[in-house]
Amino acid sequence: MDFELSMDQEILRRSVRDFAEKEIRPVARELDDREEFSYETMRAMGELGLFGMFVSEDYSGQGMDYLSYIIATEEIARVDGSHAATVAAGNSLGIGPLYYFGSEEQKRLYLPRLCSGEGLWGFGLTEPDAGSDAGNARTTAVLDGDEWVINGSKIFITNASTDISLGVTVMCQTGTRDDGRKELSCILVENGTPGFEARPMHGKMMWRSSNTSELYFDDCRVPKENLLGPRGNGFYQMMETLDGGRLSIGAMGLGGAQGAYELALKYGRERRQFGKPISSFQANAFKLADCAMYIECARLLLYKACWQRDQKKPFGLNAAMAKLFCSEVMHMVANHAVQLHGGYGLMKEYDIERFYRDQKLLEIGEGTSEIQRVVIARLIGAL
């Protein structure tokens, strides 16, 4: 067993960490306060090659393995969850379905702009009444001649309503199967299509400088060629996409936990009470020790799942475990870190306050912690 990263992966980690420290950390707090998506840092992340990392160079991707992409996401999340969300959703949820299920024409049309960071693409799955029960989607698409006519809505969709958003992949009910269940298909809808509107959502507790959207479809017509893959394969495509997405959420949890731990350790060494650094008090030292231990366990689990994916081995079980564990590790670490900061941990001038807020979505998005336990229970044969 070899636990060493390759030289290329180590170089990637250092370069992304250096970028995050120099370009993102100085502006993260202000962007969070203003709830502002930054086109400047988005352009810089594109120039660094953080989009299309696992996509073949044939489509202007970086041609890296999946673990490299996860390491990059981890390093962005170590500094700021909002920017990590843009990268994670841009790759796993935006680019992923097009790359793995799109036709050659669809790939050539969209991937080069998405891989350069010139554009973003959304992943329209969640609906107001269909969150964990994704298969109960009510958005419909009816084939009328050579066009799909789409009606319905989606909510909590990342990267869908920026000025550079090119479009969304939308899961729709396209009919009824022979067994009476809904036939679900994925359809590509470009921004600016008549009958389609993407509205930014504001007032969020977390990821305040990432873009989150509501999508509305009112007799929205798109060519029948916009179908992604075979008709009726939508639910399978979405579930496959979420397997990979769980790894990126795991990376956000791992990176966020690492960042929160480092903030707590630094503060604990500098803050003095009763004549000593507070990190030397056993209650705090044990908290920091636990944080270090759980972060290491999370990294090993997540990296193993990525290795399984890169080796084309089954990885769904460990992906669900990694998403769940990394999310909950960040919860624990952020909580300990705020406690160690005391009253200062509740103030916006200290970055740990933002980490504490950003963490919560990781236990909810791309499958709640409760749903992850259902997935794990099924995969181990308990259900």
Image (tube, helix red, strand yellow):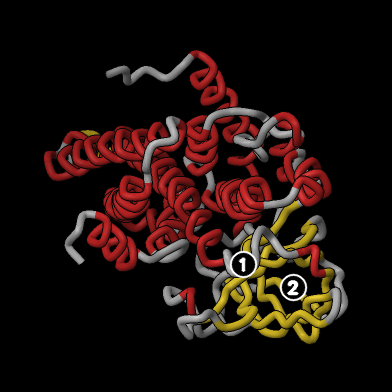
Secondary element at image label 2 = strand
Secondary element at image label 1 = strand
Residue 368 vs residue 6: left or right? left
Amino acid type of the residue tagged 1 in the rendering: Ile
The mark nearer the N terminus, 2 or 1, is 1
Q: Is residue 12 above or below residue 349?
A: above
Q: Position of residue 370 (x, y in %)?
A: 30, 67
Quarter-of-image position of residue 145? bottom right
- Residue labelled with disc 1: 157
Q: CA distance from mark 2 to mark 1?
A: 9 Å
- Residue labelled with disc 2: 198
Q: Nearer the viewer, residue 136 or 15?
A: 136
Q: Position of residue 110 (x, y in %)?
A: 79, 49
Name the residue: 66% across, 46% down. 99
Q: Position of residue 318 (x, y in %)?
A: 32, 45
Name the residue: 56% across, 83% down. 176
Amino acid type of the residue tagged 2 in the rendering: Ala
Q: Residue 125 bears which disc, if any?
A: none
Q: Find out whether the residues at labels 2 and 1 contact each other: C-beta distance under 8 Å.
A: yes
Quadrant in which the N terminus appears: top left
Name the residue: 48% across, 60% down. 239
Classed neighbour count for the residue bearing mark 2: other residues with Cα under 10 Å, few (<14), some (14–19), many (≥20): many
Q: Is residue 230 above or below residue 71?
A: below
